[in-house]
Image (spheres, rainbow, N blue to C red):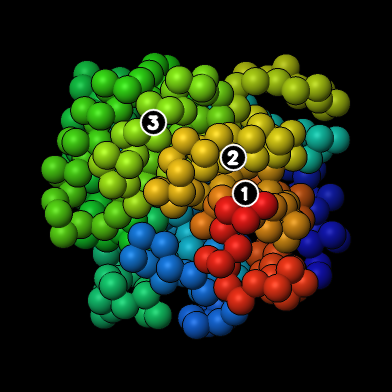
């Protein structure tokens, strides 16, 4: 309720500095009450029980500093990262821009993070005293893994991260779709992607967590078909559709010309279409996570009806504040009742 009063003060700060302040606030604030398991929005995806299908996307908590605080805001799951084997500073600043008139964000962060070992230490600490699979105690926390910018063998970097993070993750999200690491999106090509996923699965081992694959919205139909085939063949836990876009729809903000990935409201239509494309290409054989331009319960419900078993947001919280998760959860309950569905799973793909 206070966020509308605080937002002008936060928006007076540089976007990256405001982001660090938000992380600090979550670290020191009393933990909120998590959404209870077994409620009306509960759903099971890839063998995991989610108290609500709404999650926090990767990028907010790059270093796994506040996953439990995010769960306390009402998110059904939190995804940390992207995390790379070695610490790296990312791209030169400024590299994060609010497009206020467009309710959007452009970032060219470049996988800035403190490295795998530091994040793993924090993740081990949060799991101390709780079984990794006791989600009522530890919650669903996915770990988004990436490769260092200057790695000579990027597939080896992903395998190293899978090996390190598998014991700590509810699921591993393989990020080959960031536009801010040169050449990374080439790993979405069919041969490279198949080789990458084989390496990650071997490093994770058969007893490890599910593998989710995060793809770009800027794909051609042939790319979509190839990725769908691989996802079915490799029995992926889910496809995450989608990351930020390098395309530029008409924008009003003075930052419209900045390079990097665009997220927020202008991504809505493209991300929704890509979700529909992947639903058709997979025939419903692989769960989908809908991401991009989700800012309301109606947006989330539309993505679920279009085929998403789970949804994520990030940019919308910049504009709506930390109460957005509970607001969307409440709205989803009402929309389920309105449309006569008894569960989230029952509504998936029914548009």
Mark 1 or mark 3: name the one nearer the start of the chain. 3
126 or 201, which lies in front? 201
Residue 276 shows which numbered tag?
Answer: 2
How packed mark 2 is, by other alpha carbons closer than 10 Å (few <14, some 14-19, many 20 or more), is: many
* Contact, mark 2 vs mark 1 (Cβ under 8 Å): yes
SS for tag 3? helix
Q: Position of residue 80 (x, y in %)?
A: 43, 52
Image height check: is 98 above or below 64? above
Q: Earlier in the sequence, mark 2 or mark 3?
A: 3
Does residue 91 show up? no
Q: Name above or below for residue 325 compared with residue 204.
A: below
Q: Where residue 292 sits: x, y (%)?
A: 63, 42
Dividing the picture into quarters, in which one does residue 325 lie?
A: bottom right
Quadrant holding the N terminus: bottom right
| Residue at position x 34%, y 69% in the image | 126
Dot 1 falls on a residue whose secondary structure is: loop
**Between residues 318 and 263, which one lies in front from this camera angle?**
263
Q: Quadrant of residue 251?
A: top right
Determine the CA span between mark 2 and mark 1. 6 Å
Q: Is residue 244 left or right of residue 61?
A: right
The residue drawn where x is 43% and y is 68% is 44
Residue indicated by mark 3: 227
Q: Which residue is mark 1?
A: 306
Q: Residue at x 62, y 56 (%)?
A: 350
Q: Quadrant of residue 79?
A: bottom left
Mark 1–mark 3 distance (CA, rounded to whole Å): 19 Å
């Amino acid at each position: 309720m206070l966020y509308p009063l605080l937002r002008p003060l936060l928006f007076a700060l540089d976007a990256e500095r405001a982001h660090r302040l938000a992380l600090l606030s979550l670290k020191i604030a009393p933990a909120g009450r998590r959404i209870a398991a077994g409620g009306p929005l509960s759903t099971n995806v890839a063998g995991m029980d989610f108290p609500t299908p709404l999650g926090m996307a990767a990028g907010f908590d790059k270093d796994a500093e506040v996953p439990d605080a995010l769960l306390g805001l009402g998110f059904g799951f939190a995804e940390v990262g992207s995390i790379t084997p070695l610490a790296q500073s990312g791209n030169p600043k400024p590299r994060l821009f609010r497009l206020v008139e467009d309710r959007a964000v452009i970032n060219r962060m470049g996988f800035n993070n403190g490295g795998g070992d530091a994040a793993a230490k924090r993740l081990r600490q949060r799991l101390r005293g709780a079984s990794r699979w006791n989600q009522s105690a530890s919650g669903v926390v996915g770990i988004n893994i990436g490769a260092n910018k200057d790695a000579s063998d990027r597939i080896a970097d992903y395998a190293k991260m899978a090996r390190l993070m598998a014991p700590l993750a509810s699921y591993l999200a393989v990020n080959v779709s960031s536009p801010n690491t040169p050449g990374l999106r080439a790993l979405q090509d069919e041969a490279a992607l198949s080789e990458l996923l084989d390496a990650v699965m071997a490093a994770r081992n058969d007893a490890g967590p599910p593998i989710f694959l995060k793809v770009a919205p800027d794909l051609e139909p042939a790319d979509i078909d190839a990725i769908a085939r691989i996802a079915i063949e490799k029995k992926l836990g889910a496809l995450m559709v989608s990351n930020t876009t390098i395309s530029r729809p008409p924008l009003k903000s003075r930052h419209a010309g900045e390079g990097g990935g665009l997220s927020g409201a202008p991504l809505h239509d493209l991300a929704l279409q890509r979700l529909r494309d992947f639903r058709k290409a997979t025939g419903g054989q692989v769960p989908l996570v809908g991401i991009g331009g989700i800012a309301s319960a109606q947006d989330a419900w539309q993505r679920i009806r279009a085929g998403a078993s789970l949804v994520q947001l990030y940019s919308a919280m910049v504009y709506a504040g930390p109460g957005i998760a509970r607001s969307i959860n409440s709205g989803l309950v009402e929309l389920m009742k309105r449309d006569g569905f008894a569960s989230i799973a029952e509504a998936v793909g029914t548009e």
